[in-house]
Amino acid sequence: MSETSPPTAARNVLVAGAGGYLGRHLVTELARGGHSVRCLVRRPEELARPGRSGAPSLAGLDLDVRSADVTDPSTLASIADGVDAVISTIGVTGHGGDPWRVDHAGNLALLDAALAADVRRVVFVNVLHAEQIPADLTRAKSAFAATLRRTTDQHLIVNPSGYFSDLGAYASMARRGVALVVGGGRARLSPIDGADLAAVIRQQLEAGTTGDLDVGGPQTLTHHEIAELAFEARGKRPRIASVPLPVARAGLAPVRMVAPSAAGIATFLLAGLAADSAAPQFGHRRIAEHFQQLAAADDGGRR
């Protein structure tokens, strides 16, 4: 349950992971909202590249770009000096690696840098029901979230149900003609577009909201319904096959042997496919529109 405290000025905001999907949306939303934005990225050239899954270009924005690596605390010295709030979107889902090194230790190092600069307002983008998902990624995130709750009463932990960008696999499968769902695709999800989530975070930051905030998009759908929308966007008859959950889990065993890091991410994604992730509804962009944009982009690329 989130609470609202008296708003505090947060005109200068540090966005960690600014080159990622949500990071780009946040930087754009904050800059257009009149905030001064400091971007923390590992490589500054990341910001010059096009964003994935429809994330916006950051060209033309007046940004303070800083290069640092959260897994190396020595690079974070003074990174939060002069800012009023820190927002962390960092995680291995965007860059790969060990979640305990990135999602946990990396965020701890960023928190230490914030506290050293006397910044108490810290926003952390977590995962809905992270503590219930048996994967290293969510365990690492949950451990950091627990530390953040104990450390500052000005924290805001945002728990998205899932991003539109996470569902691109359905669009790809629909393009190929057959989509797979897990366990009949009955699990429910409230996916949200990155731009809508960024707007929610900016609004809550400006309002002084603290605590935990579960966030979903404007619709709650089953995975089967989402797959149907992906076919509809391409004008195709849905062809959807179901993979039993035990079979899907068994398929991860060989992956764990040869690529433990990839298996960890796959375990997290599989858990999301099998469990309900409905959340309070925010925003206005719908997943059908996202699939239509992906289909249009594919059509344009074939011309």
Image: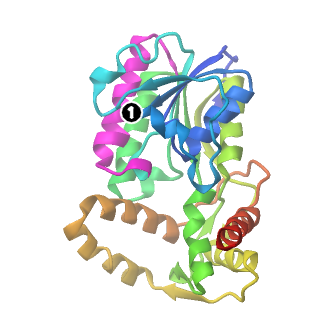
Q: Is residue 7 above or below residue 279?
A: above
**Dot 1: what SS?**
helix
**Can you see residue 252?**
yes
Residue at x 64% of width, y 23% of height: 62
Prevailing secondary structure of the magenta residues: helix
The amino acid type, in three-letter code, at marker 1 is Asn
Q: Residue furthest front?
A: 303
**Residue 137 % position (x, y):** 37, 52
**Residue 182 % position (x, y):** 50, 79
Q: Is residue 247 above or below residue 76?
A: below
Residue at x 55% of width, y 60% of height: 166
Quarter-wise, where is residue 300 in the image?
bottom right
**Residue 31 % position (x, y):** 68, 27
Quarter-wise, where is residue 29 in the image?
top right
Quarter-wise, where is residue 108 in the image?
top left
Residue at x 58% of width, y 65% of height: 167
Q: Which segment did they paint magenta?
A: 94-121
The front one of 105 and 31 is 31
Q: Which residue is mark 1?
A: 107
Residue at x 41% of width, y 35% of height: 43
